[in-house]
Image: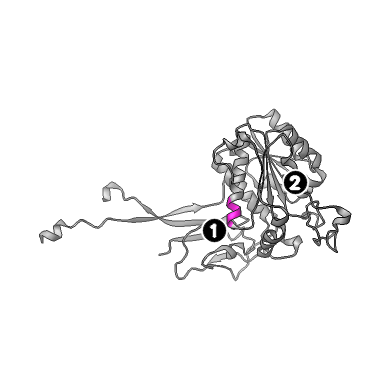
Amino acid sequence: MAKGRIKVDEAMCKGCELCIMVCPYGLIEMADHFNAKGYKPAVLIDPDQRCTGCTLCAMMCPDAVITVYRETKIKPSPAYA
Amino acid sequence: MVDVMMEKAPEKVMWAEKMVYERPAALSDIPTHYCPGCTHGLIHKLIGEVIDELGIRQRTISVSPVGCAVFMYDYFDVDGAEAAHGRAPAMATGIKRVQPDNIVFTYQGDGDMASIGMAEIIWAATRGENITVFFVNNAIYGMTGGQMAPTSLPGQVTGSSPNGRDVEMTGMPIRMAELLAGLPGASYVVRRSVHNIQTIKQAKKAIRTAFQVQMAGAGFALVELLSSCPTNWKMTAADSLTWIKENMVPYYPLGDYKVADVVKTLNNRGK
């Protein structure tokens, strides 16, 4: 299971490709389809589950359309200990 | 059998998906009119994040400029006013003096501040008004279609300097951070860029400090941010960030130009 994933708000993405530039594993590509504004939105292509949720793409995104999720360890509650 | 019973039960490790980065609440949920890859949006996002982190959204008032950021009041979920061209520091002065408990910031481009609004910013800084100013320098007039700005680099080709900026005729580009740092009223004057992750982080820290200066009543704070204009520079978004690094940063060096003693005592001083 991947450590992280991103969600791109496709309707807001302007396809500037800056997220592609900063992804350390090159996991982001432009989609084949267009959004309502006529841009090809960014999509995460991660078949090998390499995304770590490092947030670099979201930090670089000028339109703040990327939400990042990361798998984090949580303390088991005492009931399950 | 006994051994098995003595063994500890394996520790259960539980994993849960946690959101680690989202659009700041201080930004409205509408798309901006900025061109793809324009770092205006990035700077808006950094300001929005800092407003959220400092918890000042309910008492922040933005003063929008004339230029590409003219519709800024739509993009921030804070109160806002629209100033006449170049007059944002004068308007912010009035708002801050009447509403001293509010956090007032202006956001101006190079045409707005370094050209038509030069008088207002000089005097706001000289008076040491307790406002925060963000100066977005992209070395060109973006909104009007790419004419030469006071900050255009020597030799830079623009719509109104098709053979490159001739410094014999127009003088050298103006360095606003250095100019304003020389004024006695300014407390915090720095220059940052947003062309890569490292500089984005530094810019965010400086934006945070600039707000903290105002919250502490410590006087005039200005952050100059080197920004891109892919459309009028006629290059891709990625190339325009490289252009900032290779052409703008050498002429506009990043750094702290004035950090008054009162600012140094604040927490989390922007590096």
The residue sitting at 70% across, 57% down in the picture is B250
User: Which amino acid is tagged 2?
Assistant: Met
Left or right: A17, with B9 as reference point: right
Picture coordinates of residue B124, whole percent (x, y):
75, 35
* Magenta-drawn stretch contains B55: no
User: Which amino acid is tagged 1?
Assistant: Leu
| Residue wearing tag 1 | A56
- B251 versus B266 height, above or below: below
Tag 2 subunit: B
Picture coordinates of residue B164, whole percent (x, y):
83, 62
Mark 2 neighbour class, 10 Å CA radius: few under 14, some 14 to 19, many 20 or more: many
Mark 1 lies on a secondary structure that is helix
Residue interval drawn in magenta: B197-201
Mark 1 neighbour class, 10 Å CA radius: few under 14, some 14 to 19, many 20 or more: some
Q: Nearer the viewer, residue B130 or A53?
A: B130
Picture coordinates of residue B44, whole percent (x, y):
64, 49
The residue sitting at 58% across, 51% down in the picture is B201
Label 1 vs label 2: CA separation?
30 Å
Check residue B176 in the rendering and tell me which mark sits there, or answer none: 2
Tag 1 subunit: A
The residue sitting at 70% across, 29% down in the picture is B97
- B97 versus B198 height, above or below: above
Tell me, yes or no, if residue B27 can be seen here: no
